[in-house]
Amino acid sequence: MSVTVSVVIPNHNYEKTLALCIRSVLEQTRRPDEVIVVDDGSTDSSRDIARRLPCTLIELPGNRGVSAARNAGIAASSGDIVFFLDSDEALAPDAIANALELLAADRPDADVPLGCVHGIIAPEPLIDDGPVEWYRVLHAYWWRRRAVGEVRTAFFAQAAVPRTVLDDVGPFDERLRDSEDLEYSDRLAPRFRILLTDRVVARHDEVDRLGPLLAEQFRRSQLLVPTVLAARRPGSASLTANRPLGVAAVAAAVATLPLVTVAPVAALLPVALLAVFAAADPGLCRFVARHRGVRFLGYFLAVHLLVHLVLLAGAAVGGARWLTRRHRPAVRPRSRLVPSTPSGDGP
């Protein structure tokens, strides 16, 4: 008996790409049994676009976040396999067929069953909006392609998950609007294997302006400290987008800059550290130069450096906030009627 497939597409104000996304699903070599678009309080024409295409539209009141949209899609779907697809992506024609084949190939007697198959970003953008977007898609493709195989992190921008796994692991955490993938992976990985594959590919419409790109990276990097600490626990997420050597070199370059005020010759040290940063991932540099040319590689490295600086700044801010919350003394409530009693949440 063949399995059934439901595609769940959460959407919030992606009128630019939603039609391309839905059509890519309808043009699959293995068409899904149902396509569910969950509109999360869009204020653009997204809902009208979805109504004109053969899919089921669920309209959420207000903007509740991608976790709530995915949960609503799961609840409304009936397929044995739920294929999650973000509305700013378009699948390669064989993506669903390949995901199903990989899930079906798992050994029934495996000690730890395969619970998720997710894919990579294509090295070309869905819509070409300029050099910032090319930076993003090339980098996203490279670090995911480098990690292909069994991993401990699942990204649900394009991912197939059996319903039995979703029932076991539970819903997405609707309190989270960032890093919800990592939190779900933290629950998924101890119970099921996760496969990152280059046989499931989607073209992504990335951010195309430098300011919003850096703001996004700063916001997300504020969660780095608790995420890294959580990764020490067995079963926690571990995929990383940047080479630790490159991150360390940029941090050291920033730390040594004040030495220039003492001795100008000390400027050679941060320059040397930046050279280490540029050479930290030679495979990435070769890939970018081969794909877009040597001139673009210079631009790529300049933006890559800015991203690293913002990541470090965000991590510092997030780390400070985490330490403040961790060491903040607990305040016990007082009652005029009866003495307060200790609770399980106390220090």
Image (cartoon, rainbow, N blue to C red):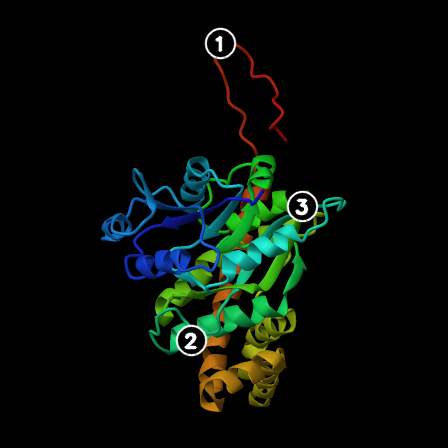
Residue at position x 45%, y 90% in the image = 295
- Height in image: 288 above or below 67? below
Q: Residues within 10 Å of mark 2 (few under 14, many from 20)?
A: many
Dot 1: few (<14), some (14–19), or many (≥20) neighbours within 10 Å? few
Position of residue 294 measured from the top left corner of the image (x, y, whole percent): 49, 90
Residue 305 higher or lower than 176, as above or below: below
Residue 337: image tag: 1
Q: Which amino acid does label 2 sit on?
A: Trp
Query: Which tag, 1 or 2, sits closer to the chain's start?
Result: 2
- As measured in the structure, the alpha-carbon distance from the residue carrying label 1 to the one carrying label 2 is 65 Å
Q: Is residue 308 visible?
A: no
Kindly indicate the quadrant of the structure image that contains residue 99: bottom right
* Mark closer to the observer (3, 2): 3
| Amino acid type assigned to the residue bearing label 3 in the image | Phe
Residue indicated by mark 3 = 192
Distance from the alpha carbon under mark 1 to that under mark 3: 50 Å
